[in-house]
Amino acid sequence: MEVILILVTGCTGFLGSAIVKSLLESGHKVRGLARHGGPFKDGSITGIDIVHGSILEPETLARAMEGVEKVIHLVGILVETKGQTFSGVHLQGTKNVLQAAKDANVKRYLQMSSMGTRPHATSKYHQSKWLAEEAVRSSGLNITILRPSVIFGPYDEFTTMFAKMARYSPVLPLIGAGENMMQPVWVEDVAQFVNKALNDQQTFDKTYELGGPEQLTFKTILTEISKATNKRRAILPIPLPVLRLQAGLLEKLHPKPPLTLDQLIMAQEDNVTKQHPWSLYNINPMHFAEKLRSYIS
């Protein structure tokens, strides 16, 4: 089998690490683009070629693309800071990666987007993701776009944060009534789908939404996290006006606010799908509570 070189941007992140591990275990040759030195410090992943650089620095992208045949673009941010904006990272960063890929004659490109991305989205996050998708669709490359729901697993920024709260706080905060629906998807399921779709021509020019097997309310998710920590905590609904006031203050005072007005907009929307693309590769996505207990406890 011919060994091809795959570039993964955001390779040292939560999802990137899982995808890199899946690709290496399948025998692929992988190069990662990383902003900082010393990736994979725990030694769990070896055999990857690292190029230090940034999607916002085109000269580093040119080096990273040398000899590459396929690109998986994962880089994204959840919160804007003074140095990083949604437009800069999601849109301009994606344009930079696309241009570097075309300059290097890369033919295959996979973009990680987000469920809820759509034209005329309310949140700035989803607006920037949609514009990035449009740039990908008009690139002329053989592209695939993936839109996962909230991805969970060890070291994520969602379940582990609330699990930490559950261990030390008598209550867990609930945004409003907590009736918005989510479809949590296991990180290794997403990594496996990426691995399979990357080499599958039937996914060219397609967009797939990836959700787990269950649609759960935010309140139910917090309850399951509390159970997994063996700490039965009270769940305290916090009115949205109070949260908006708090988020506005945090945005003004904190360099990387833990809560933003844009996040509150997204938290009021359902994040679910009717698609079930897992059947393309006979993947049975993992149930939330079962996998949660495997690492939270």
Image (cartoon, rainbow, N blue to C red):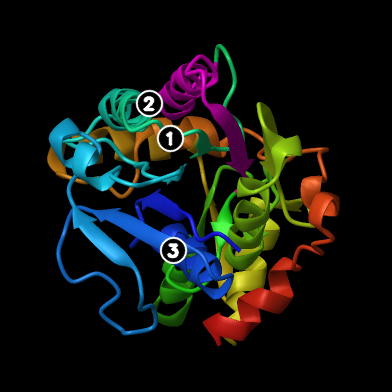
Residue at (16%, 44%) from the top-left corner?
A: 254
Relative to 238, say whether 43 is above or below: below
User: Which mark sits nearer the N-terminus, 3 or 2?
Assistant: 3
Give the residue pinned by disc 2: 102
Where does the image place residue 189, in percent across and percent down from the top left? 66, 62
Residues 273 and 182: in front is 273
In the depicted structure, whether residue 100 falls above or below residue 76: above
Q: Which mark is residue 29?
A: 3
Instruction: Report the front residue among 107 and 196.
Output: 107
Residue 63 in the figure: left or right of residue 43: left
Instruction: Identify the mark nearer the N-term, 3 or 1.
Output: 3
Residue at mark 3 to residue at mark 1: CA–CA distance: 15 Å
Q: Nearer the viewer, residue 38 or 87?
A: 38
Question: Badge 3: how crowded within 10 Å, few (<14), some, or many (20+)?
Answer: some
Disc 3 to disc 2, C-alpha distance: 20 Å
Name the quadrant of the N terminus: bottom right
Residue 234: quarter of image: bottom right
- Give the magenta-colored segment's residue range: 121-149
In this picture, residue 272 sits left or right of residue 100? right
Quadrant of the snapshot with the C terminus: bottom right
The secondary structure type at the circle numbered 2 is helix
